Amino acid sequence: MSLAADIPLSATFTWIPRQADFDAFARLSGDDNPIHVDPEFSARTRFGRTVSHGMLLYTRVFAHLKALYPGRPHALQTLMFPNPSYADEELTFSFQVNPGQADQILIEVKRSADGAVTLSGTCDLGGEK
């Protein structure tokens, strides 16, 4: 089943993750790696500051996908995290229907300031529930 005509072919959103988001996700997920939750530790790493959990970014992606394509289950997701996302830096989330595969959504998250891609992937949508 392909996407209905009234479903957007593309959409863009922004979000500024905060350290409080990293901390809350660490408590919820159990992933309390200091690179995510300890600014003093992170300052001594190659990143120079705390970085987002990849799955925290994906939870935001998932929420947008559910809102954009209601009733469409996610059959398959592919994700890569080529660059870090930092606390207090705006991210731009982009979603686009793959022109070559109507039931696949192309996903990209970029740091708004420098355009570095922090999440790249796809989501194959299943039929409506």
Image: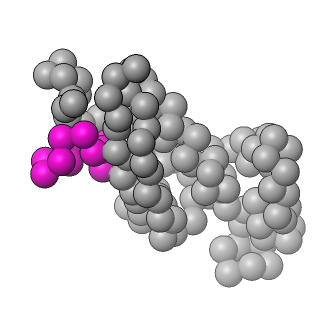
Residue 128, position as x, y percentages in the image: 34, 22
Residue 100 position, x and y percent, is: 13, 51
> In the image, what residue occupies the spot 68% across and 81% down?
46
Does residue 80 sit above or below 111 in this rendering?
A: below
**Would residue 23 be visible to someone looking at this image?**
no
Q: Seen in the image, is 12 located left or right of residue 44?
A: left
| 31 inside magenta stretch | no
Name the foreground residue: 107 vs 17.
107
Q: Position of residue 50 (x, y in %)?
A: 73, 62
Residue 5 image offset from top left, x and y in percent? 14, 22
Is residue 47 visible to us here?
yes
Of 24 and 98, the residue lying toward us: 98
Judge left or right: residue 108 versus residue 5: right
84 relative to 108, above or below: below
- Which of the 4 image quarters holds residue 115? bottom left
Residue appearing at x 75%, y 44% in the figure: 25
Magenta-drawn stretch, dominant element (helix, strand or loop) = strand
Q: Quadrant of the C terminus?
A: top left
Q: Nearer the viewer, residue 45 or 60?
A: 60
- Depth check, front residue: 48 or 60: 60
Q: Residue at x 18, y 23 (%)?
A: 4
Magenta stretch: residue 99 in it?
yes
Q: Residue 49's quadrant in the figure?
A: bottom right
109 horizontally vs 47: left or right: left
Magenta-tinted stretch: 95-106
